[in-house]
């Protein structure tokens, strides 16, 4: 499985955009980029995923570079409730195992 | 639609005891998996299954057994609990259309 690299922690002011980077330089052509978040000790929650094109949903936007070696998750207007650990994962689907790294602890402050 | 249900939510064991963590999903998902999460750490994959009768090891399988006799259930067995197995355990199932993982609420296990 391809590995990802994320900063350990980031801070963001409430109301501002939170941009969370992820490096996945060894990603394979059939692997998707997934983002999850974990609030406190709850089970992780799916946010968004993409293959090549940028994606947007009601929670966030995902920007994937043209060479697919990195991506950025954007929370357009961060709130205190967005404080969580964010995990970037690359995964080919099917019967492949899905492993998590250590993620980025995002702290949204007033 | 209950999603992924884990039981028990909390459990305290003594070293050497055995127990089973239960996981059930009602979404007809083929893929199910177990993760453990230690304090301040990310999730580590223990075992996973791509369908009834099929299981495989993840990153940290030692000390745990699994079986998958039905699509709905994926129990995790600790045969002889050790303090190093004190952790929060999450079960997850995956939808085939988007690949999104659905997680249970977690089972908090303490081994004394």
Image (cartoon, rainbow, N blue to C red):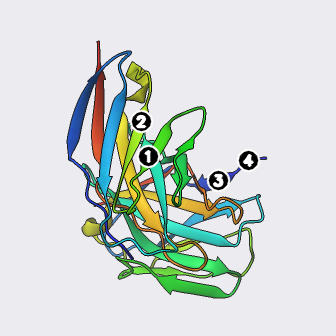
Q: Which mark is residue A63?
A: 1
Q: Is residue A66 left or right of residue B52?
A: left
Q: Earlier in the sequence, mark 1 or mark 2?
A: 1
How packed is label 2: few (under 14 Cα within 10 Å), some, or many (20 or more)? some
* Circles 4, 2 touching at the beta carbon (< 8 Å): no
Any part of residue B18 in sight: no
* Circles 3, 4 touching at the beta carbon (< 8 Å): yes
Depth-wise, is mark 4 or mark 2 nearer the camera? Answer: 2
Residue under the image location 74 percent in, 73 percent down: B71
* Circles 1, 2 touching at the beta carbon (< 8 Å): yes
Q: Distance from label 1 to label 2 (Cα)?
A: 8 Å
Depth-wise, is mark 2 or mark 3 nearer the camera? Answer: 2
Give me the chain letter of mark 2: A
Residue under the image location 38 percent in, 15 percent down: A15
B64 to B28, vertically: above or below: below
Q: Position of residue B39 (x, y in %)?
A: 26, 50
Q: Distance from label 2 to label 3 (Cα)?
A: 31 Å
Kindly state the secondary structure of the residue where label 1 is placed: strand
How packed is label 1: few (under 14 Cα within 10 Å), some, or many (20 or more)? many
Give me the chain letter of mark 4: B
The residue beneath circle 2 is A74
Any part of residue A10 in sight: yes
The residue beneath circle 3 is B5
Q: Position of residue B74 (x, y in %)?
A: 62, 71
């Amino acid at each position: 499985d391809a590995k990802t690299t994320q900063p350990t922690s980031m801070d963001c002011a409430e109301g501002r955009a939170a941009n969370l980077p992820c490096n996945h330089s060894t990603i394979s052509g059939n692997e998707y980029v997934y983002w999850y978040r974990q609030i406190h000790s709850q089970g992780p929650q799916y946010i968004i995923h993409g293959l090549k094109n940028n994606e947007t949903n009601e929670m966030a936007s995902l920007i994937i570079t043209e060479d697919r070696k990195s991506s950025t998750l954007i929370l357009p207007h961060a709130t205190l409730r967005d404080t969580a650990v964010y995990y970037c994962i690359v995964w080919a689907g099917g019967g492949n195992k899905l492993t998590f790294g250590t993620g980025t602890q995002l702290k949204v402050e007033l | 639609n209950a999603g992924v249900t884990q039981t028990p939510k909390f459990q305290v064991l003594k070293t050497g005891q055995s127990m089973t963590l239960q996981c059930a999903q009602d979404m007809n998902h083929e893929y199910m998996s177990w993760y453990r999460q230690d304090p301040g750490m990310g999730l580590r994959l223990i075992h996973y299954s791509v369908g009834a009768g099929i299981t495989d090891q993840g990153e940290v399988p030692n000390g745990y057994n699994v079986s998958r006799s039905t699509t709905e259930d994926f129990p995790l067995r600790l045969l002889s609990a050790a303090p190093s197995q004190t952790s929060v355990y999450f079960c997850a199932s995956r939808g085939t259309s988007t690949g999104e993982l659905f997680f249970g609420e977690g089972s908090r296990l303490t081994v004394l």
